[in-house]
Amino acid sequence: MNRQELIAQIRRKRSYLCVGLDTSIDKIPPHLLEGDQPVLTFNKAIIDATRDYAVAYKINTAFYEAQGIEGWEIMEATLKHIPADCFTIADAKRGDIGNTSEQYAKTFFETYPYDSVTVAPYMGKDSVAPFLKSKDKWTIVLGLTSNEGSRDFQFLPVSDNELLYEKVLKTVASWGTPDNLMFVTGATRTEQLAHIRSILPDHFLLVPGVGAQGGDVASVSKAALNKDCGLLINASRAVIYAGNGADFAEKARMAAQELQEAMALYL
Amino acid sequence: MNRQELIAQIRRKRSYLCVGLDTSIDKIPPHLLEGDQPVLTFNKAIIDATRDYAVAYKINTAFYEAQGIEGWEIMEATLKHIPADCFTIADAKRGDIGNTSEQYAKTFFETYPYDSVTVAPYMGKDSVAPFLKSKDKWTIVLGLTSNEGSRDFQFLPVSDNELLYEKVLKTVASWGTPDNLMFVTGATRTEQLAHIRSILPDHFLLVPGVGAQGGDVASVSKAALNKDCGLLINASRAVIYAGNGADFAEKARMAAQELQEAMALYL
């Protein structure tokens, strides 16, 4: 999916909601466990319930990998179930030397035809570059993450008035364009989001952490929207586990709609 | 595998060679392509040929993931074929927020019972900690990598007289012990290896890049051996692609033996 198609979808749905499918078999409604592949049943129901309000789906690969082969089968079937007009993200946090990143790019752009994959920056340019070669595919590089551990290294001062995450944002931005690069920028640091927007006026930012990790649609939107929207706000647990009974999909739909309506105010 | 078992194996085989199974279907001997699962046939032959000289095998997960389900099946069968006395490494470069790293730890310690997994440090303590919880399992964190891109961020000065990779080594070391933590430290920077050893006198270091990436057994060993050996030197392409004909396994055996004999001089 290219940038124009993504922006058109955002305007059409009046939403920049990304639903995170971090689906754990321990957390889905108990009644689903009686059937075959309950995680897939759950994911399909969540996608069907939220597709009018979400412009993107983010599949957290760890939750599928942990189930072995069956997990990858469920991941693939989930990916196929996502409507063609939605942007798909493999939240895989990959990154290695060049010949290995090429294999990861093949994994998430060809073997499994996602629109994008998340990538860790520590190994530098040749670990990111192979992901940037595919037309209409996106590399989403970790800039500032929303977890407690982000304080360990990302906020280290690396030069006069520059922190490591700022250096990462600026340096990685020079390796691609706003048409093939996005950045993960954590919502629990809204005070930094406006600053990040000033560093990267044009790039899309993937903001995790709304809901379970404590972020907030209004503050994120005020801080970081740009003229093309330029935001994907992810909600995982707050949407997919909104209910745990027979009406779990309806509860998820309501949670997604509530977020979409909050976003529509800013578009 | 615990530290004592690893050290005992190193003394027994007089080797600290790790063979990297970065197996690409494009690079294996053409005659193998006629059979079923040629990558698995290749890996088994390489393991059988090198097991007397190697103390560890490192499976680069990217090369298997890129093949989808069949790749994971081959990876699992390869892992099962590795002799029980050898140390196994999932070279997966994972790392995410805590609940997600828990899933990756499950993937590589339970679903696929590796002894260790490589982990990227950018997201900090809660992204690494879940890997450190399993008894006799190891977390191998990226310190200094051997690729060109390591210069982009790892050498940034983060405080007076301290570079980012040094800060990462020291900080991550405080989260675990030499019994459950190792570090990836690139062999193309032998001038830094002695320095790293002075920072981390007791930890095992996994040194990639001997052979195709230009490192050298003698210089690495002189710089970084400690009283318990404390080194695993990885060779991937230089061993597994030593030959490309009917005698590929014999050529790999000879390459592994040559490295082992070079190592025996230092033990």
Image (cartoon, coloured by chain):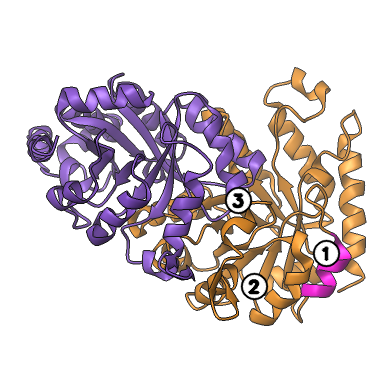
Chain colours: A orange, B purple
- In depth, the one of A95 and A123 nearer the eye is A123
| Image x and y of residue B142, in percent | 42, 50
Nearer-N-terminus badge (3/2): 2
Residues tagged 2 and 1 counted as in contact (Cβ below 8 A)? no
Q: Provide the residue designation for mark 3.
A: A91
Residue A15's disc number: 1
Task: Please rate how many residues cluster around mark 1, counting C-alpha atoms within 10 Å: few if below 14, some from 14 to 19, many from 20.
Answer: many
Residue B227 placement: quadrant: top left
Amino acid beneath label 3: Asp
Q: Provide the residue designation for mark 2.
A: A3
Q: Secondary structure beneath disc 1?
A: loop
- Position of A137 with respect to A38 (left or right) is left
Q: Secondary structure beneath disc 3?
A: strand
Frontmost of labels 3 and 2 is 3
Disc 2 is attached to a residue of which chain?
A: A
Disc 3 is attached to a residue of which chain?
A: A
Q: Which residues are magenta?
A: A216-224
| Image x and y of residue A103, in percent | 39, 51
